[in-house]
Amino acid sequence: MPSSKNSASKKSSTKPLLISAGVALAAITLGLVSWKATAPTGTGSAGAGSGAVAAPRTDPAAELKALARRESGDKLAVGRTDAPVVLIEYSDFKCGYCGKFARDTEPELVKKYVADGTLRIEWRNFPIFGAESEAAAKAAWAAGQQDRFDAFHAAAYAPGSKEKGFAEPRLVELAREAGVPDLERFKADLAGEQAAAALKKDQEEGYRIGVTSTPSFLLNGKPIAGAQPLGTFTAAIARAKAEAAKQ
């Protein structure tokens, strides 16, 4: 499992991934619990000792599940908004393990589960490798405004792509490769306030629930850490679908 400092340098054997999965699960759950425990509970201006009653604490697992946005206009998502299973992915374009998931696993999930309406995948930009990671995240968002997020995502995660870096000329090249029709608009969106705000929203969500490395996932609110084998995801989707059917 990759760390937030050097994910690409770790070995991808199953055992370290599974160990890290437990660590990440604890980090995400405890991160949310910590946030809930310290979040303001009062809605009025009364101070301590005023007799105000704190709002009741909610279930962290339910809160994680509720992070699925299910927005019909989400340009960085694929699948039906009413799909019984939602996979939220926190990723970085400079992360080697994220690229592995994007190339080896995600296409199979799309083919098998998105196509039949079972699964929705929602992307969250979570850059952890510095300025170029953040620039690539904004570029992906900008490509999405012209309905080319999926194509940009594929181009940015193609073998050898991250080694070329994500300076602005390279991002424009990727946008051209992805078929973004208006490159001038792309460049304006890339540098604009909306891209920065969208990135900040995703980052704050991830940090709030304790995400510390990429890729990290929530599948109907349950954490999955790292570029796990396809079977890990298919088994989790089957369980989540069965649980959703009982509700």
Image (cartoon, rainbow, N blue to C red):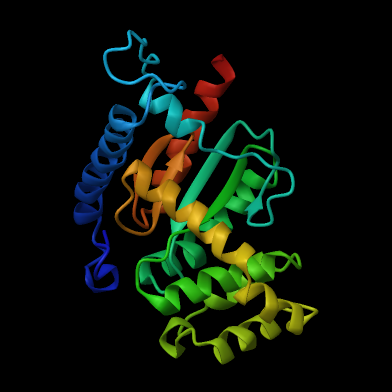
> Measured from the top left, where is residue 106 in percent x and y?
53, 57
Apparent side of residue 11 relative to residue 57 in the rendered image (left or right):
left
> Measured from the top left, where is residue 146 in percent x and y?
76, 68
Q: Residue at x 57, y 58 (%)?
A: 198
Apparent side of residue 138 relative to residue 70 in the rendered image (left or right):
left
The quarter in which the C terminus is drawn is top right
**Closest to the observer, 234 or 83:** 83
The quarter in which the N terminus is drawn is bottom left
* Total marks placed: 0
Apparent side of residue 22 relative to residue 91 in the rendered image (left or right):
left
> Measured from the top left, where is residue 216 in percent x and y?
38, 52
Q: Residue at x 61, y 83 (%)?
A: 174
Residue located farthest toward the right when viewing the structure as drawn: 181
**Closest to the observer, 56 or 71:** 56
Q: Residue at x 70, y 85 (%)?
A: 176
User: Could you say which quadrant of the image residue 82 lies in?
Assistant: top right
Q: Residue at x 28, y 19 (%)?
A: 48
Name above or below for residue 245 compared with residue 79. Answer: above
> Measured from the top left, where is residue 84 in percent x and y?
61, 31
User: Could you say which quadrant of the image residue 92 lies in?
Assistant: bottom left
Q: Is residue 192 visible?
A: yes
Q: Is residue 178 visible?
A: no
Name above or below for residue 199 compared with residue 50. Answer: below
Name above or below for residue 153 compared with residue 176. Answer: above
